[in-house]
Image: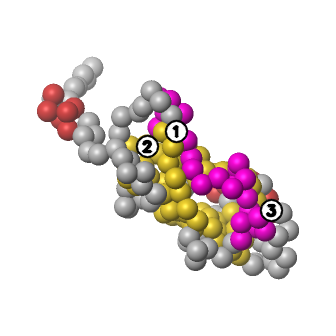
Amino acid sequence: MFIGCLPEKSETALIYNGPVVTEIKNFTFGQQASVLSAKGVSTLAGTQTDSTRTVMLNVRGTDSILVQLVGPQSAAPIDVNFRVRSTSTAVEGTHYTFNPVGARKVTFAPNTSLAYIKLNLVPNSLTTVGDQRTVIVDLLSDGNIKPNPNFNKFIVTLRR
């Protein structure tokens, strides 16, 4: 029988002591291709990274962008604002809507570290097979909680 423990200094080294930040993650990245395909997520080479995902417009229905709170959780809800970049090629209201419609914030429920920005995809809003549009989302600072500069942007590509 082998029993091992980390020395106290090693355990302490694993505790995050940095500033509270938010960041976006691709929660489908690394999942099995057959599972993703069935859910309308493209598995072609280069269509997924930790900050991008390509979805099939007429299959996916609703897509979600995972937002994480890094640091201590709060007993009160935390709102984090986001924006859609003007360089996005998908048009809100034509190709997608946020859920709730017009949303520009995501809320961490009390004592949680995860929240989701939800996009409802509009079926048949792209008429040519192979056509695609992008939705580029940036997390914004509320003054107290800043987005992690390495994970503050997410690109969802809508493909017909």
**What is the crowding at mark 2: few (fewer than 14 residues within 10 Å), some, or many (at least 20)?**
many
Q: Is residue 95 magenta?
A: yes
Q: Is residue 30 above or below residue 7?
A: below
Number of the front mark, 1 or 3: 1
The answer to which of marks 2 and 1 sits earlier in the sequence is: 2
What secondary structure prevails in the magenta region?
A: loop
Q: Which residues are magenta?
A: 91-114
Q: Residue 38 location in percent, x, y?
A: 74, 54
- Which residue occupies the foreground of this view, 38 or 2? 38
- What crowding class fits label 1: few (fewer than 14 Cα within 10 Å), some (14-19), or many (20 or more)? many
The reply to whether the C-beta atoms of the residues labelled 2 and 1 are less than 8 Å apart is yes
Earlier sequence position, callout 1 versus callout 3: 1
Residue type at the position of mark 2:
Leu
Question: What is the quadrant of residue 74 in the picture?
Answer: top left
What is the quadrant of the C terminus in the image? bottom right
Q: Mark on residue 69?
A: 2
Task: Report whether 26 appears left or right of 15.
Answer: right
In whole angstroms, how far apart are the C-alphas of marks 2 and 1? 8 Å
Closer to the camera, 3 or 122?
122
At x 71%, y 66%, the residue is 92
Picture disc at residue 122: 3
Vertical placement of residue 75 versus 95, above or below: above
Alpha carbon separation for disc pair 2 and 3? 29 Å
Residue that appears at 42% across and 59% down? 151
Labelled pair 1, 3 in contact (Cβ < 8 Å): no
Q: What number is the disc on residue 108? A: 1
**Residue occupying image coordinates x 48% and y 39%:** 78
Identity, as a three-letter code, of the amino acid under mark 3:
Val
Query: Residue 6 appears in which quarter of the rendering?
Result: top left
Return the x and y of residue 75 as percentages of the image width and height.
Answer: 45, 27
Q: From this viewpoint, is residue 96 visible?
A: yes
